[in-house]
Amino acid sequence: MEVKDRVVVITGAARGLGRECALRFGERGAKVAAFDVDWEGLSSLKEEMDGNGNSSLVRVVDVTDEESVMSAFEAVVETFGRVDVLVNNAGITGDHLLVRRKEGDVRKFPLDLWNRVISVNLTGVFLCGREAAYWMTEKGNKGVIVNISSISRHGNIGQSSYSATKAGVVALTVTWAKELAPYGIRVAAVAPGFIDTPMARAVPEKVLEKVVSQIPAGRLGKPEEIASTVLFIVENDYVNGRVIEVDGGLRL
Ligand SMILES: NC(=O)c1ccc[n+]([C@@H]2O[C@H](COP(=O)([O-])OP(=O)(O)OC[C@H]3O[C@@H](n4cnc5c(N)ncnc54)[C@H](O)[C@@H]3O)[C@@H](O)[C@H]2O)c1
């Protein structure tokens, strides 16, 4: 699919990978609808995109809230007439060991932390994917959904909920690729390794240093290396139902 003039919805676009995708799609002449809970980040994105002469719409959306997601997609269709691409990117971490025993202190993985991560990373991806597919099929246009998974989908210490959601995102990707193929809608995923964004920078410095020492590329990934993979998926009509791992050679 050619990117120019396409309507591209990006969730979690106020910073990090989502913001980078918004700017790169804008550069290529796409009309970008940026969703996030962070209004300040969205405003500064809008300012930058306006300055670049790009067409964009920013909207405060909590991807876990069905009403919020549905009305945001309606607003996109009202403004731009259709939805061609969804980058299903919003995500959070919520790390905890299943059971942590240290010097007589015992802590269990809190249920509310588990639920929070499931709700953003899985329910949010589901709701946005559903609304994108609804509008693509309603308007009868082809489309592409790119879900953002993670190499943590293979299982990572301290990330029960995060790993489970990122594996779930891949299952959704394959399921939707099969279900939506008759409508000319492709669905694929990117599974980043450790990329230099606020999410990765929230990892304690010592832990991050250890991780970097295990990456064959010898460094964190750059956000543009993920954005260019998302663009590649959108542009290459033969990519469907697959996950592209972009991790500098690090394997979990
Ligand atoms: N950075 C990495 O190393 C890395 C690695 C693998 C996968 N990922 C995945 O890539 C995606 C983007 O990560 P990032 O590093 O840019 O993270 P980030 O924390 O820098 O940005 C995430 C954005 O999502 C938004 N968001 C959070 N909850 C939301 C909600 N309920 N509704 C709408 N927006 C919400 C945040 O406000 C933020 O702007 C996530 O799905 C993440 O799991 C990141």
Image: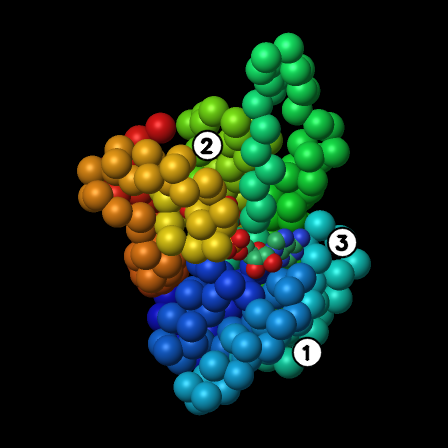
| Whole-number angstrom distance, CA of label 1 to CA of label 2 | 36 Å
- Name of the residue lying farthest toward the top: 104
Give the label, 1 or 2, closer to the camera: 2
Does 56 sit above or below residue 181? below
Residue 9 place in picture, x, y as percent:
55, 66
Residue 49 place in picture, x, y as percent:
48, 81
Quadrant position of the C terminus in the picture = top left
Q: Which residue is drawn at 53% across and 43% down?
A: 176
Q: Which residue is drawn at 37% across and 50% down?
A: 195
Number of the label disc, if any, that sits on residue 78: 1
Q: Does dot 2 land on a helix, a strand or a loop?
A: helix
Residue on which disc 2 sits: 153
Instruction: Kindly tell me whether residue 184 is visible in this rendering.
Output: no
Residue 190 place in picture, x, y as percent:
40, 47
Q: From the viewer's perspective, is 214 left or right of 67? A: left
Three-letter amino acid code at the position of disc 1: Glu
Q: Does dot 3 land on a helix, a strand or a loop?
A: helix
Residue on which disc 3 sits: 66
| Within-10-Å neighbours for mark 3: few <14, some 14–19, many 20+ | some
Instruction: Kindly tell me whether residue 11 is visible in this rendering.
Output: yes
Q: Residue at x 71, y 50 (%)?
A: 64
Q: Determine whether the beta carbon of the residue marked 1 sits less than 8 angstroms from the nearest atom of ligand 1.
A: no
Residue 178 place in picture, x, y as percent:
49, 41
Whichever of callouts 1 and 2 sits on the residue coming sooner in the sequence is 1
